[in-house]
Structures are given as C-alpha cells and as structure tokens.
C-alpha cells in the first residue's frame, strides 16, 4: 500500500510515531552533547577571563595575548579534516571520548604558563586536541536526523556556546576572585585547573553512554530503528557528493568556507574580548564582570531556539542566517558610538551576541543538505577548519589594533564588516541557486 492510499487515520498515527522516535533520540543524545560542548567552549575561551589576572602577573602585552588566544586555531585547522574522517571511520563514541580527555588534560596544563612561548605551545596543542569535536558532532547528528529536523537539534546543541557564557562567566569570575592565592596559587591558574576537570570526566561518560549509529541504539525499538534509518537513507540518495575528495572539489564548500570565516570573526571577536569590553565600561570586579557576561549569552539562547523553530517550520534558511549576522554587525558598530557605561555596553553587546550566535547556528543546516558520507565528514570539517582560522585572525587583529590605537573600536568595525560579508555571501549563494533552478 503506498503513502497515497493510506487511510486518513494512518497518516497522523505515523507522524506521531515518528515524532515519538525523534523525541527519544533527542532526549538521549542532545543533553550529553550539549554538556560536552559547554565544557569544550569553556576550555577554549576561559583564557579571556584568565587574561584579567594573567597579563599583569606574566607581563604579557595585548598582542601576546591576542596571538596566544588565536594560535589555538592553527592546531585546530591542521587536524580538523583528518579528525573528522577518523570519527567517520572509527565511530563517534571512541573518538569524541578521546577528544574530550586529551583537551581537558592540556587545558589543565595551562596553569604552568610562564612565558609567551609556553603560552603559544599549549594553546596550539589545545587546538590540536580539540580539532574535530564540533564538526564531528555536526556530522554525528546527520547519522540520526534528516535535514527537515536538523535546524532545531543543531541549535539546541549549539546553545552550548552561550550557555558556556551563562555558566562560565559567573563561575570564572568566582574562581578568579575566591581562589586567588589559595595554596599560593594564582586565581587564573585555579581557573584552568578547575574548568578542565569536567572535560576529562565527560570523556569517560561518552565512552559508555554514546551510540555510534541508529543500529547500535538498544534504547530504540526495532520499528523505530527502521523508521529512522529509512529517513536517513532516503535523504542520502539525494545528496550531491559522497566521497571525501568530492567535498574538496565542490565549489559550494569553498564559498561556505568564506561565509563561515566572516561569522567566526564575529563569534571570537566577542567571545575573547567580551570580559575586557565590559571591564572598559567601568566594571572592575571579576565576579561582577562574570555575572554581566552571562546576560548576552542568556538572551542568545532564547533567540537561537526561537529562530531555529521558525526556520524548520518555514523551510526558509538564507534569511534566518544572514539577517541575524547583519543585526550583530550593526550592534557592534553602535556599541562604539553610545556612552561607555555598563548599561549601554550590556545592551549593545547583548544584541550583537544574539545576532552572531543565531546566524552561526542556522548556518550548519546548509552543508549536510548537499554532502553525505565521507564527503560530509570532510566537507563539514573543511568548512569549520577554514572558517575557524578567523579565530586566530580575530583576537590577534583586535589586540594589535588596541595596542596601536589604545582603543578596540576599529577592531570592532573589522569584525562587523566580516559579519556583513558573511551574510551577503549566504544571500548570494541562495540567489544564484534560485536562478539556476528557474533556468
């Protein structure tokens, strides 16, 4: 019996069964992946809080900090594609566990930084260790969810970025203020020690809790497994590329690399400098800065979830990506013209953070729509690795501009321009695709 001849009562029943199956998958996978991403992002950007004490103690300049913060992404870039291909071959469970444990140990070793060289080396190794985690999860979600359901689940996972700010801001500020001098150890060292522990522990949780594929999920019924796998197989037959080499030859992949580079300029321009920008508005207490940092990230969580729901319902993607990026860019520019008070800093930086993170989350619906198999593993990792080179460029440029001019304003203009360019590329891609379809 075909789908068109099913009794009217069967269609709602089938939809309900499918919704139940995906709800079970979401509750099983997403909370754990979300917690892992919170730990990952926290270990990546907590150097922004450590900076509040570390620079004075170690006599580092803003340029040294900017280079050290950004050099993380050189190691990240070099190992991103190999890491994702290994995940595709070896399975997500073992590989994600390895990533978590290794980066946690290296992050904890940041307490031993004494010179610019050790700072650079450890940040580089941290990037090498963490490479493949984010694109690995994006790839892993394609093993379970078809594209029509992917925007919401991707956004739920990526709320780990703002939640790392919501949790990590107050936590980092508290650690810096409360542990400074305990056992003769500086607060910024305690920050790296304490915040590295969850990553190592989560690595062992992932090893025992995560399933590589739908077929491995003992918590799903046989009927649910068949239903979910049928949806994945149906979509896999429609993608353009399945081979790893095909991803490198696909022009769309390289264009998306350029757009993503612009978005990441915004993400890390804000992520690495948000505590310093709030401090510059007149707030000196690390604990207070920590709580204020949580405000922009809390607002971003709500914006990401609401936008993803609307995107999946409407099926429209390009404006759900570009418009938030444009809003974020405008807010960054406005932040340089308003009075430099805590209130105005929080308002403008909150709008900027909401826009940047929302556009970023929506972006990741695009690559899996035309890449499958090894091509998805390579293409997603390639886009993420090239785009994340902006994580090296952004903090270094802002730090260099601040050292040269005494202000971060020109650096924020560069970041805003990058967001506009990224959004414009997304709109141009969609417009070109529409013209080709019409032809």
Image: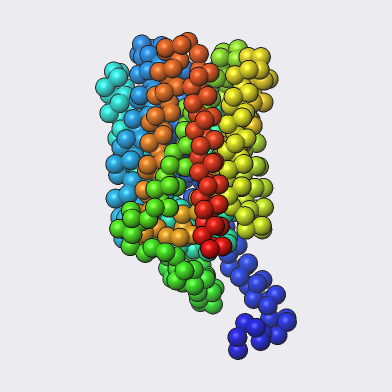
> Where, by quadrant of the figure, is residue 62 drawn?
top left
Q: Is residue 171 left or right of residue 140?
A: right
Q: Which residue is drawn at 36% across and 14% down?
A: 60
117 in relation to 429, above or below:
above
Residue 409 spot, x, y in % from top left: 53, 18
Q: Is residue 358 above or below residue 139?
A: above
Please tell me which residue lies in front, 379 or 24.
Answer: 379
Examine the image and state in which quarter residue 112 appears: top left
Q: Is residue 105 visible?
A: no
The percent coordinates of residue 380 (x first, y second) are: 41, 52
For the N terminus, the quadrant is bottom right
Q: How is the image coloured?
A: rainbow
Residue 265 relative to residue 86: left or right? right
Q: Which residue is drawn at 46% across and 11% down?
A: 405
Q: How many labels does the image show?
A: 0
Looking at the picture, how far across and down is residue 341, in whole percent? 65, 15
In the picture as drawn, the residue positioned furthest to the bottom comes out as: 1
Query: In front: 406, or 18?
Result: 406
Spot occupied by residue 65 in the image (x, y as percentages of width and height): 38, 20
Q: Which residue lies furthest to the front in this view?
A: 439
Give the vertical position of 21 relative to 312 (above or below): below
**Left or right of 253 on screen, residue 429:** right
At 65% from the left and 36% from the top, the residue drawn is 299
Quarter residue 23 falls in: bottom right
Q: Is residue 10 visible?
A: yes
State the residue at coordinates (62%, 28%). Answer: 331
């Amino acid at each position: 019996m075909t789908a068109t001849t099913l009794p009217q009562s069967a269609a709602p029943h089938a939809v309900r069964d499918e919704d139940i199956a995906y709800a079970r998958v979401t509750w099983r996978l997403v909370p754990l992946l979300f917690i892992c991403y919170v730990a990952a992002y926290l270990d990546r950007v907590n150097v922004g809080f450590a900076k509040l004490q570390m620079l004075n103690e170690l006599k580092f300049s803003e340029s040294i900090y900017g280079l050290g913060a950004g050099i993380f992404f050189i190691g990240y870039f070099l190992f991103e594609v190999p890491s994702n291909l290994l995940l595709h071959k070896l399975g997500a469970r073992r590989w994600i566990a390895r990533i978590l444990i290794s980066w946690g140990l290296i992050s904890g070793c940041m307490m031993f930084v004494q010179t610019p060289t050790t700072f650079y080396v450890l940040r580089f190794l941290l990037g090498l260790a963490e490479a493949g985690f984010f694109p690995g999860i994006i790839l892993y979600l394609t093993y379970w969810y078809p594209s029509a359901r992917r925007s919401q689940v991707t956004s739920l996972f990526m709320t780990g970025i703002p939640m790392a700010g919501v949790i990590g801001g107050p936590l980092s500020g508290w650690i810096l203020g409360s542990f400074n001098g305990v056992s003769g150890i500086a607060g910024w060292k305690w920050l790296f020690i304490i915040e590295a522990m969850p990553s190592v522990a989560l690595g062992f949780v992932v090893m025992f809790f995560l399933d590589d594929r739908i077929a491995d999920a003992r918590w799903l019924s046989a009927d649910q497994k068949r239903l979910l796998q049928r949806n994945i197989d149906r979509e896999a037959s429609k993608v353009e590329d399945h081979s790893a080499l095909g991803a490198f030859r696909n022009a769309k992949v390289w264009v998306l690399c350029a757009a993503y580079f612009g978005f990441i300029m915004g993400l890390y321009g804000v992520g690495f400098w948000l505590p310093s920008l709030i401090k510059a508005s007149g707030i000196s207490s690390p604990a207070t800065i920590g709580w204020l940092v949580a405000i922009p990230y809390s607002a971003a969580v709500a914006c990401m979830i609401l936008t993803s729901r609307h995107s999946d319902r409407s099926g429209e993607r390009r404006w759900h990506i570009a418009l938030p990026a444009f809003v974020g860019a405008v807010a960054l520019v406005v932040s340089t013209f308003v009075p430099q008070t805590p209130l105005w800093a929080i308002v403008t930086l909150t709008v900027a953070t909401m826009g940047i993170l929302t556009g970023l989350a929506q972006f990741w619906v695009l690559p899996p729509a035309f890449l499958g198999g090894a091509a998805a593993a390579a293409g997603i990792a390639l886009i993420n690795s090239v785009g994340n080179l902006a994580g090296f460029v952004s903090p270094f440029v802002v730090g260099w501009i601040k050292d040269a001019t005494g202000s971060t304003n020109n650096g924020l203009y560069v970041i805003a321009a990058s967001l506009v360019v990224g959004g414009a590329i997304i709109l141009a891609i969609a417009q070109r695709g529409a013209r080709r379809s019409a032809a």
